[in-house]
Image: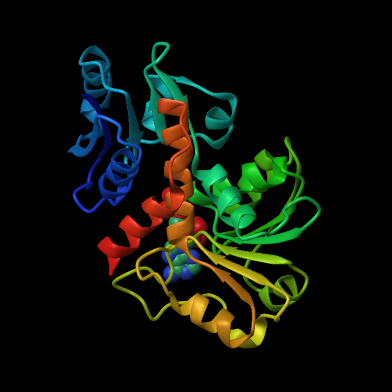
Amino acid sequence: MKLFGVLGDPVSHSLSPVMHNAAFKALGMDCEYHAFRVSPENLEKALYGAYALGFGGLNLTIPLKEKALDIVQPSELARQIGAVNTVDFEHGMAGHNTDGMGAKMALSSAGIKITGKNILLLGAGGAARAIAFQLAKDGARVTIANRTLERAEALAKDVKKVGKAQASGYENLKNLIQDSDILINSTSVGMYPKISGTIVTSDMMHKDQVVFDIVYNPQNTLLLKEAKKAGATTIDGVMMLVFQGAESFKIWTGRTPPVDEMEKAVREKLA
Ligand code: ATR
């Protein structure tokens, strides 16, 4: 039996165990995935311990993703993003970041093209960094709008090294939204328990728009409700969660997991 897991703090509410265990079961693999509470001070010991114990792979979540860069051998993308969410033990300790790929796959599995599209990304935190780098690399024009302009500017400056990016505050949001093909919320606004929050309302959106919220609890956020009111196409945060997990799964096992089974397991757990 091979062990996998997610390290973080807090981590007890992580949906990753139910999601990955559903995939292992569907594929008939003799593997188990568990959540482990680990503080930043203990990350290095925990990673070496898992390596020594023969773990198949790990995910990292808050507050460990940035710290891991100094411990594992990060991929170029993980280094650019500044965070590691996946550790593979096949050849030493390799660090990857599959969050941006999760966002990309959530869009492309819904039939949405990225190359040449105007993408308005709300937020400039850790999740935004991963998404901005990936989508800019894929040929989108990414406008990063953030409450704190300086953070958006710093991220846009980094992303410009790999593609097209610009920064903005929230004062000109309506025009920016009108000009965008895809709107992505990568802030925590609208997340449980503050579910009555949204940065954008239906009057600011248009029906040809794709609106993607990375918040998955609740699944139908206020932003997505507003987007539906405007007639826009919506994608929820469960899809990003599932696809970032699917990318990690591929890295660890070399196998393509059943994303529909993973999605089902996550939605059942959330419901
Ligand atoms: P994560 O790693 O989950 O992305 P983070 O790095 O703390 O978390 O980033 C949170 C993001 O949500 C930031 O873009 C933050 O905006 P600021 O940089 O201005 O703080 C955004 N955010 C959080 N609460 C917000 C609110 N009430 N209104 C607007 N933006 C908010």
Q: Quadrant of residue 88?
A: top left
Q: Which quadrant of the rendered structure holds the N terminus?
A: top left
Q: Residue at x 48, y 61 (%)?
A: 187
Q: Residue at x 77, y 58 (%)?
A: 117
Relative side of 65 to 54, left or right? right
Q: Residue 27: x, y in percent? A: 35, 38
Q: Residue at x 21, y 35 (%)?
A: 39
170 to 58, vertically: above or below: below
Identify which residue, 28 or 147, lies in the foreground. Answer: 28
Relative side of 69 to 81, left or right? left
In the picture as drawn, the residue positioned furthest to the right comes out as: 116
Q: How many dots with numbers?
A: 0
Residue 206 seen? yes
162 to 270, vertically: above or below: above
Q: Residue at x 67, y 59 (%)?
A: 111
Q: Which quadrant of the rendered structure holds the C terminus?
A: bottom left
Identify which residue, 44 or 100, lies in the foreground. Answer: 100
Q: Residue 71: x, y in percent? A: 37, 19
Q: Residue 238: x, y in percent? A: 43, 59
Residue 84 seen? no
Q: Quadrant of residue 6?
A: top left
217 to 67, vertically: above or below: below
Q: Residue 85: x, y in percent? A: 41, 36
Identify which residue, 159 or 250, lies in the foreground. Answer: 250
Q: How has the structure been colored for display?
A: rainbow
